[in-house]
Each structure stands twice: as structure tokens, then as C-alpha cells.
Amino acid sequence: MQSDGGDAGAELTRVTQNAVTYTRRVVGTAKARNERQRAENAELIKQYEQRRLAGTAAERTPTAVRDAAKRFRSARGLSVPRLPELGEMLPRARPKAAEPSQSGDDDEDFSQERIMSRLD
């Protein structure tokens, strides 16, 4: 019966080591994700301070979502900064230069070439 106790002890050790290894892997993944999120947030803060929108967003976040974020931050004692209006965040578009008009000679129409070359 001694061998059964030894096998159970070895099994317990193996299971415990597997659990510790798994836990370390999960913690490492969570830390990496957290660091990536912090870096993304830092970049968004820089863009916010420069009054630029990230990406191509052209619509303001819905009021219900903004209010929920304010309540969340206030409940946790975090600051609630004044957010700029959408117009303040959009980059100013540069006017496009007018393209020079083409003269009639440069704008030849070759769509009738097939008809014109037909000899009947």
C-alpha cells in the first residue's frame, strides 16, 4: 500500500506543478495585454491633447456612453476631464488645388474610332 501513497503524492506534485505553470502563463499573458492597453491609452491621450481624432472617426460617442464613462470614473474617484467638441478634434482639411482644365485638343475622343475606321 505504500506504493499507492507514493503514486498519489507524485500525482499531486505533478498536478500542482501544472497548475502553477498554467497560472504563470495566464498572468504573463494578462500583464502583456495590460501593457499593450496602457501603451495604446498613452497614444490616445497624446492625440487627445493635440486635438486630433484617432483613425477616421467622424461621429461623436453617443451621450449614453459618455455619461456611463463619467459615472464610472466618478465612482472610482478618477478625474473626469472636459472633452472637446467633435469640431475641435477633427483635423482641419486643406483645400485641394484646382486641376488645370484640359484644352479640346488634348481631350480626344477615341470612342468612335471603330466606326470611323470601318470601310463599307
Image (cartoon, rainbow, N blue to C red):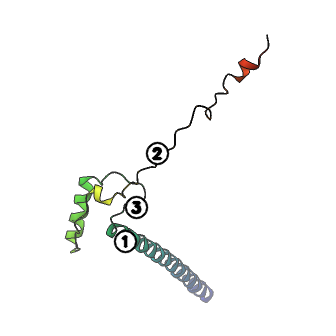
- Residue 34, percent across and down? 43, 74
From the viewer's perspective, is 42 left or right of 28?
A: left
Task: Give the x, y percent position of residue 104.
Answer: 58, 31
Q: Amino acid at mark 3?
A: Ala
User: Quick one: SS at disc 3?
Assistant: loop
Residue designated by label 2:
98
N-terminal of the pair, mark 2 or mark 3, is 3
Identify which residue is drawn at 67% across, 22% down: 112
Mark 1 in CB contact with mark 2 (< 8 angstroms): no
In the rendered image of this protein, does residue 50 appear above or below residue 66? below
Q: Nearer the viewer, residue 53 or 5?
A: 53
The residue shown at (21%, 64%) is 71
Q: Give residue 54's mark.
A: 3
Q: Tell me where residue 116 appears, x and y as whole percent.
A: 72, 18
Q: Residues within 10 Å of mark 2 (few under 14, many from 20)?
A: few
Residue in the image at 40% along x and 54% along y: 94
Q: Residues within 10 Å of mark 1 (few under 14, many from 20)?
A: few
Residue at 33% x, 51% y is 59
Marks 1 and 3 close (CB-CB < 8 Å) = no
Between marks 2 and 3 in the image, the one whose residue lies nearer the viewer = 2
Tell me the CA gap for discs 2 and 3: 29 Å
Which three-letter amino acid code belongs to the residue tagged 1?
Lys
Mark 1, residue position: 46
In which quadrant of the rendered image does the C terminus lie? top right
Q: Secondary structure at mark 1?
A: helix
